[in-house]
Amino acid sequence: MTKNIQALRGMSDILPAQVGLWQKLETAIRELTSSYAYQEIRTPIVESTGLFQRSIGEETDIVAKEMYTFADRNQESITLRPEGTAAVVRAGQQHGLLYNQEQRLWYAGPMFRYERPQKGRYRQFHQFGVEFYGVASADADAEVLLMSAQLWKKLGLFEHVSLEVNSIGLAAEREAYKQALIDYLTPLAERLDEDSQRRLQTNVLRILDSKNEQTQALLADAPVLSDFLTEQSQAHFARVCQLLDYAGITYRVNPRLVRGLDYYNHTVFEWVTDQLGAQSAILGGGRYDTLVEQLGGRPTPAVGFAMGVERIVLLLEQHAFGQDTVQSADIYMIALGQNAEQVSFLLAQSLRDALPYARVLQHCGGGAMKKQMKRADRSQAQFAVILGDDEIAQEQVIVKSLRGQSDQVVLAQSALVSYLETHLHENNKG
Ligand code: ATP
Ligand code: MG
């Protein structure tokens, strides 16, 4: 026997029973981004490996151990995108969208990271993200933060999530702080967890968000980053906080929040939930004023965030929408005999033209009334539209209600559209 081929580990199929929830979330994202006047951008799923090395940073988890990197047939090193920002900057740069102008952009799509798969953590996952270019002041930070809060409100998740914010200042301020942290931790190095020992040499800031308890305990008396920020940087952060306060968004200032990518400065933030076990981060972002320049462009201030779609779908399953029903149609067309079949096709088309929100399912494969009715029931359609030779002769049609009281009416075929238009459930009207 041949062995069945399975999907790759950590890569999921999204089946028809689950896709309804995805589509609801996608609709909410479209409404949200449109109401904030952001425009969609779509970039390729693979990019030159160098793009991610130069932007995300060689010493980050993503670049050091999570990327899907291949040589193509021409021996070029290419990488399945592990996140969206680098490619948006690359595209903005390449097409002259960034220099000397404001851009409010959003993207959504699959990302790839070679991680240990578990609930809420996959090797192919999806992100929705926004990027706002061209404004350096704190109101831009506040705009993307308020937008993320608005999404939770739209989705009915606001009470299950909370916001953490921090400022990591400018590179020069961080350099001074890094040195202070190295000086503090070096004598304690032997008591740090293994990852943190390595990071002491390579990326000391990342030690701050180590999940290891002993490491966290050792950090209790460590110097804090905010003491190293200039007045100007502190003022930027204070204004972000003030705008959040004014908008009534509660948050916690987490002085250990640094985020896993190298390109951030000033404001960093993360929305977290306690409902998904270890995978608590549902959306992360911050300001990144040096990335465009770092990738070869002119200095361009920028701020943005990325949200993990699967984790939100899990939350929606648990809280807001519940399991979706597998209703596959609104109207089920039943035809008895070849003549009826022909007419049924035309009637179905007239329904689709007139009622574009209705899902009209045409029975195929013939069979007796009983068999076709059974299929109609299984589709969970609201109405069956039945045609046989008698109905054809009279230019009539039978409409049978399949939900609630199962009554049926006989109508002139010409009256079918207006009958269904009045009687289809409100919630099917798009
Ligand atoms: P984590 O700490 O959970 O690894 P991260 O800091 O690596 O998250 P980001 O790079 O900030 O995540 O990506 C933004 C969001 O994308 C995360 O908040 C999370 O919701 C989601 N995400 C990241 N990695 C994965 C993954 N492997 N599977 C599913 N969702 C993910
Ligand atoms: Mg990660």
Image (tube, rainbow, N blue to C red):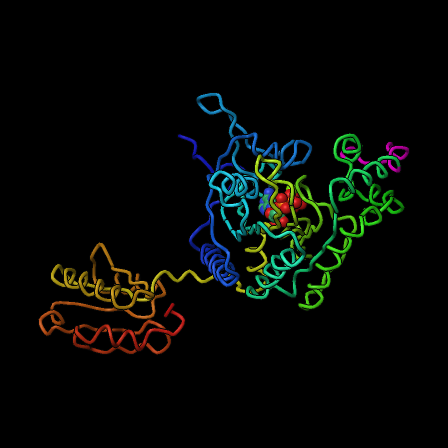
**Ligand 2: which quarter?**
top right
Residue 352 location, x and y as percent? Answer: 26, 64
- Report the front residue among 261 and 71: 261
- Report the front residue among 114 and 392: 114
Looking at the rendering, the stretch of residues picked out in magenta corresponds to 184-195
Q: For residue 249, what is the image quadrant?
A: bottom right
Magenta region, mostly helix, strand or loop?
helix
- Report the front residue among 43 and 8: 43
Residue 123 location, x and y as percent? Answer: 56, 39
- Report the front residue among 401 and 259: 259
Question: Across the whole image, how many numbered discs are drawn on residues?
Answer: 0
In the depicted structure, whether residue 52 falls above or below residue 278: above
* Image point (57%, 43%), residue name: 85
Regarding residue 300, the answer to whether it shows in the image is yes
Q: For residue 154, what is the image quadrant?
A: bottom right
Q: Quadrant of the C terminus?
A: bottom left
Q: Quadrant of the N terminus?
A: top left
Q: Is residue 166 left or right of residue 151?
A: right
User: Does the stretch in magenta take in 24?
Assistant: no
* Image point (84%, 42%), residue name: 214
Residue 70 location, x and y as percent? Answer: 52, 27
Residue 311 location, x and y as percent? Answer: 59, 52
Q: Is residue 27 left or right of residue 178?
A: left
